[in-house]
Each structure stands twice: as C-alpha cells, then as structure tokens.
C-alpha cells in the first residue's frame, strides 16, 4: 500500500470534506503513531500507521461497501437523464460506487453498492451460484405443485431452464411467498412466477448470499456494511 496524505485519509474514512479534515488536523485533533501531527500534507501508510482522530482509531478500508434499502420508483443505474436513480439516494461520498446487479424499478429491498469490482463480479457470476432471496406477493396461491415446479427448474423462454429454485409459502397467506434463486436473469422472479401461471404484485429482495437487508433501514436509507458482513460476502465467493 502506498502512502497517502493525512488529510485525504481522514476525509476518506470519516466523510468529512478535505478542508474540514485539514482544519481538524491543524487544530491538533489527529495523532500518528502516538505523535500529534498538525500538517495535513503529512504522508501516512494507512495499513501500517496508527492514526487516531478525536481519540478514536481511523480504520482504513481499501474499498467501500454500502447496503441500500431500495424503494420502488427509482432505477438501478448510475446515471439517467429522465429517472431518479439509486445513486441519487446516497451521500456524495458514495457517488463513485456502483450497484451490484440490478433490481427492477418497482422492486424494493437489498441493493449492495461498492467499488470492489472483484467482489461484485464474483457475486454476479453464475458459476458462484450466490443465492438471492425475495419476498413476493402473487395474484395466485402457491402450493406443493408450484414448489415442485420451482425446484425442478422452469422454462421462462430462455435457451435453458432455470436452475433449481426454492419457493416457500407464508404460513397464513399462500399468496405471500419467499423465493430463492441462484442466478440473476433479466426479470427472473417475475418470469418464473408467470411460468407457473401467476403474476408478481410486489417484490422485495431480502438477501444476497450471507448479507441480509437490515430491518432497521427504512426505504431509501443506507449504511456501510460491518466488517462481519463484508467478511461473510468474501466467504460466499471464496475470497
Ligand atoms: N427478479 C425480478 O423479476 N425482478 C427483480 O427486480 C429482481 C429479480
């Protein structure tokens, strides 16, 4: 890891602007390896040097990972001339991240944003078979027959049938289902439900691999992943 300026490190890790980071450093609120440093241009190695800001250690991460609770009505894209995108929902410091896969405009739920291209690529790779679980409301009731059809794979009009998928019904309401797929084809869940003779009325992604949507995140809200969540995703794809 190359060295970087102290003000850049503080700004990257705290979300403070570069000029606010400079001010804080000049005020003497930062120490490096136990020594108070008042020079914003001081070079540090974020992986080796111990940097303390306002009494708390700065934890440097090479990549950023954000969980967004995508609401319906926004599109999964980085830019769009007409529509509001998921990137319009996050803070400025996260604007450089990219969504991992896509959710339809009317789909809600878990969307991961990151600048870690390697992880993103592996999470989306069909070879890794990372499972995605969705909650769906259907216009028909699902039962044993539909569960079996999902398990056996469905012809959704592509060259190949879908890989085995799981369908579970809610105990009280057989139109409320939980669908787990291991691929990410275009409109896959909706097309699978059409293949069993129904329609999806509402769709929400609950999980991707070991990562679950945080229940306490309201629609449109986001937060960085914890260390454990990042490690979980790395394990999911063999990194
Ligand atoms: N499957 C769909 O049909 N739509 C989504 O947004 C995600 C999975």
Image: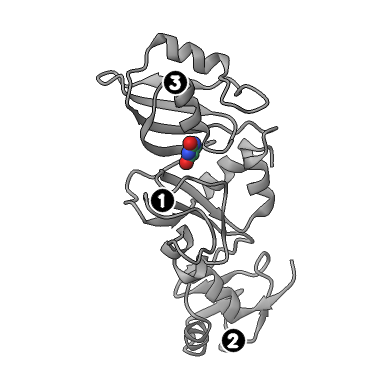
Q: Which residue carries the number 3 mark? A: 167
Q: Position of residue 159 (x, y in %)?
A: 68, 26
Q: CA distance from mark 2 to mark 3?
A: 56 Å
Q: CA distance from mark 1 to mark 3?
A: 23 Å
Q: Residue at x 65, y 84 (%)?
A: 42
Q: Which residue carries the number 2 mark? A: 40
Looking at marks 2 and 3 on the same chain, the residue that comes earlier in the sequence is marked by: 2
Above/below status of 137 relative to 5: above
Q: Looking at the rendering, which quadrant does residue 184 occupy?
A: top right
Looking at marks 1 and 3 on the same chain, the residue that comes earlier in the sequence is marked by: 1
Q: Mark 2: few, some, or many residues within 10 Å (few <14, many ≥20)? A: many
Name the residue nearer the viewer: 48 or 123: 123
Q: CA distance from mark 2 to mark 1?
A: 37 Å
Q: Secondary structure at mark 1?
A: strand
Name the residue nearer the viewer: 232 or 206: 206
Furthest residue in direction left, as rendered: 172
């Amino acid at each position: 890891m190359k060295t970087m300026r102290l003000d850049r490190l503080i700004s990257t890790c705290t979300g403070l602007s570069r000029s606010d980071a400079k001010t804080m450093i000049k005020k003497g609120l930062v120490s490096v390896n136990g020594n108070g440093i008042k020079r914003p241009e001081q070079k540090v190695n974020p992986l080796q040097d111990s940097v303390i800001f306002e009494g708390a250690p700065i934890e440097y991460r090479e990549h950023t990972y954000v969980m967004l609770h995508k609401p319906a009505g926004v599109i999964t894209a980085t830019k769009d001339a007409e529509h509001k995108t998921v990137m319009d929902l996050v803070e400025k410091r996260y604007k450089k991240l990219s969504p991992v896969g896509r959710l339809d405009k009317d789909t809600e739920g878990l969307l991961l944003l990151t600048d870690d291209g390697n992880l993103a690529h592996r999470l989306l790779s069909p070879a890794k078979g990372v499972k995605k679980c969705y909650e769906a409301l259907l216009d028909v009731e699902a039962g044993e027959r539909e569960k079996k059809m999902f398990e056996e794979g469905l012809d959704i009009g592509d060259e190949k049938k879908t890989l085995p998928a799981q369908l579970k019904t809610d105990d009280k309401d057989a139109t409320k289902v939980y669908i787990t797929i291991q691929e990410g084809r275009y409109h896959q869940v909706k097309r699978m439900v059409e293949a069993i003779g129904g329609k999806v009325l509402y769709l929400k992604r609950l999980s991707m691999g070991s990562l679950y949507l945080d229940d306490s995140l309201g629609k449109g809200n986001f937060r960085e992943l914890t260390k454990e969540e990042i490690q979980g995703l790395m394990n999911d794809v063999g990194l």
